[in-house]
Image: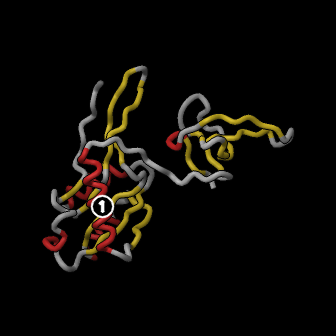
Amino acid sequence: MPILHEETNRFPEDVLENQHDLGEDRQWWAVYTKSRQEKALARSLLGLKVPFYLPLIQRDNAVRGRRTRSHVPMFSGYLFVCGSESERIRVLATNRISRLIQVPDQTRLVRDLRYLDRLITSGVPLTLESRLEPGQGVRIKTGPMLGAEGVVISRRGQSRLLLAVQFLQQGVSVEIEDYQVESID
């Protein structure tokens, strides 16, 4: 199984352990990136020497019948920056972000990121959990039903996607996993 190399997911290496060494004028920001720009932004921040953390996890994929393992962002669209006001402006200038989200409880965020980092480095199998709720509209983003839209229903503890023909007021349901769909609401 080919393994795509893991890119740098933090700068400096001890950004989560020694925040005090970074300087008093820095604060943490959650950065919501443009679509699929997390790693590109991390490379840009590394070049700018702006402290950041991008939690990456391993994911196995099948590409043209071959199994591959890649490193993908744990939280799609997000990475975390610890910067001063001038560094915040340089981050905005990368043109890779949609918005910066101010973190009201800096201590708690750092503590949570440390816990996540320990889980990731421990090697235990992790399952990403999303907040798909019954009644939520979703679009399938992988597989033979790519692009189909429907509503999430729950039946016997399993997540199912209801595809309906509104005119006939009838439909079918199929079992789905969270990673196969994206919210359209």
Q: Is residue 108 above or below residue 11?
A: below
Q: Quadrant of residue 20?
A: bottom left
> How was this image coloured?
secondary structure
Q: Secondary structure at mark 1?
A: helix
**Which quadrant is the C terminus positioned in?**
bottom right
Judge by depth and name the residue closer to the eye, 149 or 125.
125
The residue most toward the bottom is 24
**Which quadrant is the N terminus positioned in?**
top left
* Residue pictured at 19% horizontal, 70% vertical: 19
The residue most toward the right is 168
| Residue 163 in view (yes/no) | yes
Q: Is residue 32 above or below residue 154?
A: below
* Residue pictured at 29% horizontal, 58% vertical: 115
Residue 66 pos. (x, y %): 38, 21
The residue most toward the top is 65
As drawn, is 130 to the left or to the right of 55?
A: right
User: How many numbered dots are placed on residues in this image?
Assistant: 1
Residue 44 pos. (x, y %): 26, 55
* Residue pictured at 37% horizontal, 50% vertical: 74
Residue 139 pos. (x, y %): 61, 43
The residue most toward the front is 156
Q: What amino acid does circle 1 point to?
A: Leu
Q: Quadrant of residue 81?
A: bottom left
* Residue pictured at 32% horizontal, 40% vertical: 58
Q: Residues within 10 Å of mark 1 (few under 14, many from 20)?
A: some
Residue tagged 1: 113
| Residue 149 in view (yes/no) | no
Residue 136 pos. (x, y %): 65, 52
As drawn, is 131 to the left or to the right of 86?
A: right
As drawn, is 111 to the left or to the right of 185?
A: left
